[in-house]
Image: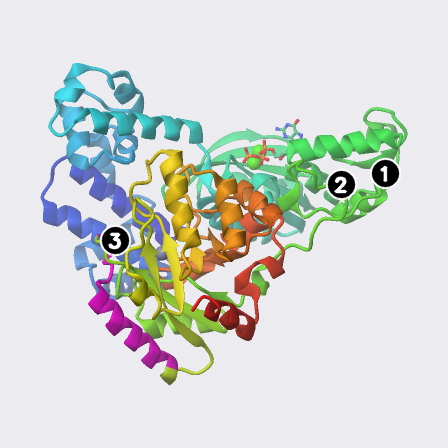
Amino acid sequence: MMTNNDIAAVFKQIASALELLEANRFRINGYQRVSRVLKDLTEDIAGLVDENSGSAVKRLATFDGIGKGSAEKIVELVTTGKMAEHQELLAKVPAGLFDVLGIPGIGPKAATLMWKDLGITSLADLKARLDSPELARLPRMGAKTIENIKKAIEFREKAGDRVPLGVARPIALRLRDELRNVPGVQRLEFAGSLRRGRETIGDLDFLAACDDPEAIRERFTTLPEVTQVLARGETKSSVRLETGGAVLQADLRIVPQQVYGAALMYFTGSKEHNVRLREIAIKQQRRLNEYGLFEGTEERPQDHGAAPVAASDEESIYVALGLSYVPPELREDRGELDGEPPRLIELTDIQSELHAHTVASDGKMTIDELAECAKRHGYHTLAVTDHSKSSVIAGGLSEERLLAHIDAIREADARMDGIKILAGAEVDILPDGELDYDDEILARLDVVVASPHASLGQDPKTATQRLLRAIRHPLVHIVGHPTGRIINRREGLSPDMNALFEAAVEHDTALEVNANWRRLDLRDNHLRHALEVGCRIAINTDTHRAEQMDFLIYGILTARRAGLTAASCINTWPAEELHAWLGSKR
Ligand code: DGT
Ligand code: CA
Ligand code: CA
Ligand code: ZN
């Protein structure tokens, strides 16, 4: 079944192809608009088309930004799996050129020139020509631009083919539910890095126990997202998936139900965690493998009819080894087997959202809509934090607009029941650490989130000083996405994190785990160190549109990987406690 994101991705690719072909700007904008509108829709388009394709065209065309022509193309795509216009464009533009276009700093004009003038059609081509005088002669290709492109390509290569958690997880959840519908399925979970909540995923690992292994194998290898079956074996099948612009490999392993726990443990990993567990078993004159925990030192005891001490569930295996159950997110061989693991924060512990945007800057919701959204999530407090004036592209607010916005927020708070709406701002930390509003303005805000947005290529020393100034500022509550990194795209700042953490403790400033899966900033290993010195942590979604409030799970998974408990996270505090802490900075 094609998702709205899948359909949006096709329109986005059409727009990119047209840009590369230097088509009419209005036409390009039209496709980009359709792509955006589709992403925002809450109705399931494929479902709509399934019911009646004729009325679906009419219904789709009622959405702002979608004309009758686009509506027909959407129906064509959903019903046939292809769109003629898309296919024609793909035949005209070399596939590798989309990767070139995906490099930050390379716009469509530059990519087209590289293609037409220099014959560059892939990242490999571009890499080979980076030092060539022809490239430097292209318009607006200064030494600095080329240097930035070099860095971006290196960063991309380091990332490899790993897919961000926020792309992989929704796909995996959908496939999991699909596979659970196969008759005879007893257990079906995902394992691997996805279950551990890593920020990027190499491949998806599914583990099944099923009365009818052939049925699950058949379903898995014929899912609509499957573009290639790489292996189809008794115990393991592998496929290549393409959906919503993402390309992923997925493995399915089928095991008997009695050993499901041992297999789940084994295929959840990490490999390093598993090695430790096997060592512990061996010290006890036992053996641990994907079939269970066995007495004795014999290899492959399961082949010799030995019955396992524990195998059916993970917890019983940890307990039989004399260990406490280790949540998957901690299984990275970072000391999680030495003593009792902490009680990790959970999604349901979160009671407030302290970083969110409205239409006043670059958000899609009004104050009221945002507040309704936060209420639906059961929060007692919402901070409205639009951008400050230096974030021009994001529609940052001048002082004058901010003051009017504060009034509007206070008015909404007085009018609405069931939630406290706080007036805040996401204030730019300027390159030298100065904040984007002066103290007199900041003091009027209930919540100040200070974040770096520009000059993210700055050297570590300057970055440290910059962020320290913000952390030490008495009116700042939270430093938002402290490094500014974008997963797989931008390295961001590399300050002395320990210096930041110490200052944050001293000045009682919270550090954010930005839950947007493109950011996850603080990242897990930074957060782990922050917790060691006792930093207060905020987990915020930085919501710009309603569905982004569900990004919270990515922040929670990241936080769990670092060992965060509910008490250290200000978003879990009851209203009184949170408001008192916020007030202590005023
Ligand atoms: P990924 O896919 O790179 O994001 O990371 P994982 O952890 O999902 O790794 P993957 O897919 O290669 O393997 C899934 C799990 O299987 C891994 O976490 C641990 C388990 N495993 C245990 N021993 C081995 C082994 O010898 N080879 C492999 N490939 N996996 C093993
Ligand atoms: Ca994997
Ligand atoms: Ca795998
Ligand atoms: Zn923000």
Ligand 4 within 8 Å of disc 3? The answer is no
Quarter occupied by residue 56: bottom left
How much space separates mark 2 and mark 3, taking CA atoms? 46 Å
Residue 98 at x, y percent in the picture: 27, 33
Residue that label 3 marks? 391
125 relative to 507 in the view: left or right? left
Q: Secondary structure at mark 2?
A: loop
Which quarter of the frame holds ligand 1?
A: top right
17 relative to 278 in the view: left or right? left
- Vertical placement of residue 77 versus 357, above or below: above
Q: Secondary structure at mark 1?
A: loop
Name the main secondary structure of what is drawn in magenta: helix
Q: Residue furthest left?
A: 24
How much space separates mark 1 and mark 3, taking CA atoms? 61 Å
Residue that label 1 marks? 308
Please indicate, yes or no, whether residue 160 appears anywhere in the rendered image.
Answer: no
Q: Residue at x 66, y 37 (%)?
A: 334
How many residues crowd mark 1 within 10 Å: few (<14), some (14–19), many (20+)?
A: many
Q: Label 3 amino acid? A: Ser
Q: Nearer the viewer, mark 2 or mark 1?
A: 2
Ligand 1 within 8 Å of disc 2? The answer is no
Q: Secondary structure at mark 3?
A: loop
Q: Residue at x 54, y 75 (%)?
A: 576
Residue 132 at x, y percent in the picture: 20, 15
Q: Label 2 amino acid? A: Asp
Residue that label 2 marks? 338
Residue 153 at x, y percent in the picture: 33, 27
Q: Earlier in the sequence, mark 2 or mark 3?
A: 2
Residue 399 at x, y percent in the picture: 23, 65
- Vertical placement of residue 415 versus 213, above or below: below
The answer to if 399 sits in the magenta stretch is yes
Region in magenta: 393-413
